[in-house]
Image (cartoon, grey):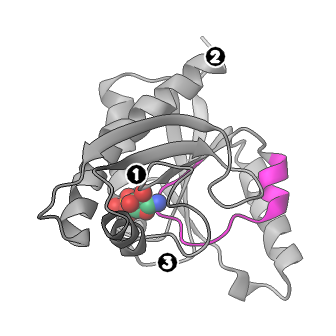
Amino acid sequence: MPNTKKRLAVFCSGSGSNFQALFYAIIERALPAEFVLCLSNRPECGAMDFAREQGMETLHLSDKQFGSLDEFAAAMVTALKERHIDYILLAGYMRKVPEAVVRAYADRILNIHPALLPQFGGEGMYGINVHTAVIEAGETESGATVHMVNEEYDKGRIVMQGRVPVLKSDTPEILAARVLECEHTLYPDALEKVLDEHQ
Ligand code: GRF
């Protein structure tokens, strides 16, 4: 029987807790997909360590390795095409995905953002900044959003959202931890939905 599993690349820059949640959910839920590549702008980070532990291919790719952004983008597209990647999952990737890659993978790049888009998105809205802004705005609810990636920051089609309460006693760090826990089930749920839609 031919292998019909979708080939996934994950792009990370940090601890990779979402990547790990996705990795294990794919196995537990027997989803028709497998990670075949972990790409990072940082050769040493939690996500790359986890990928190596799993015997997965890792690729350190940074714009600093190239003479121009166009060359960097072309190298990224080539690397993805050579490995027959079907979907890219951004999981804490702290760089903008080059437009050439977004065009080559239209409707096939997912990202997770730690707030309820379209609010609290856009440039500068990452990490603890997001949760600080949510608390300062007096929101009583926050959450996470999985969306498709297009040329504009945090503006692609929303695939799924998860909600958590914001408590009066919350610090940005406490809220961040609650949202991250929500992300760990939301991202696998969203991946499952996308795989179903594209069947
Ligand atoms: C998450 O909060 C995610 O929403 C954001 O980056 C963080 C990544 O965390 N895009 P981790 O590396 O998956 O632990």
Q: Is mark 2 within 8 Å of ligand 1?
A: no
Along the line of sight, which residue is nearer the eye, 173 or 32? 173
Kind of residue sitting beneath label 3: Pro
What residue did someone put label 1 on?
A: 19
What residue range appears in magenta? 89-104
User: Does 53 sit above or below residue 46?
Assistant: above
* Residue 54 visible in image: no
Q: Which numbered mark, 1 or 3, is in the foreground of this view?
A: 1
Residue 97 magenta? yes
Q: Earlier in the sequence, mark 3 or mark 2?
A: 2
In the image, what residue occupies the spot 74% across and 51% down? 150
Q: CA distance from mark 1 to mark 2?
A: 26 Å
Kind of residue sitting beneath label 2: Pro
In the image, what residue occupies the spot 41% across and 53% down? 55
What residue did someone put label 2 on?
A: 2
Residue situated furthest top in the rendering: 1
Q: Earlier in the sequence, mark 1 or mark 3?
A: 1
Q: Is mark 3 within 8 Å of ligand 1?
A: no
Kind of residue sitting beneath label 1: Phe
To which quarter of the image does residue 47 belong? bottom left
Along the line of sight, which residue is nearer the eye, 174 or 46? 174
Report the quarter where the N terminus lies: top right
What residue did someone put label 3 on?
A: 43
Q: CA distance from mark 3 to mark 2?
A: 34 Å
Q: Dot 3, crowdedness within 10 Å: few (<14), some or many (≥20)?
A: some
Q: Position of residue 87 (x, y in %)?
A: 64, 41
Relative side of 172 to 72, left or right: left
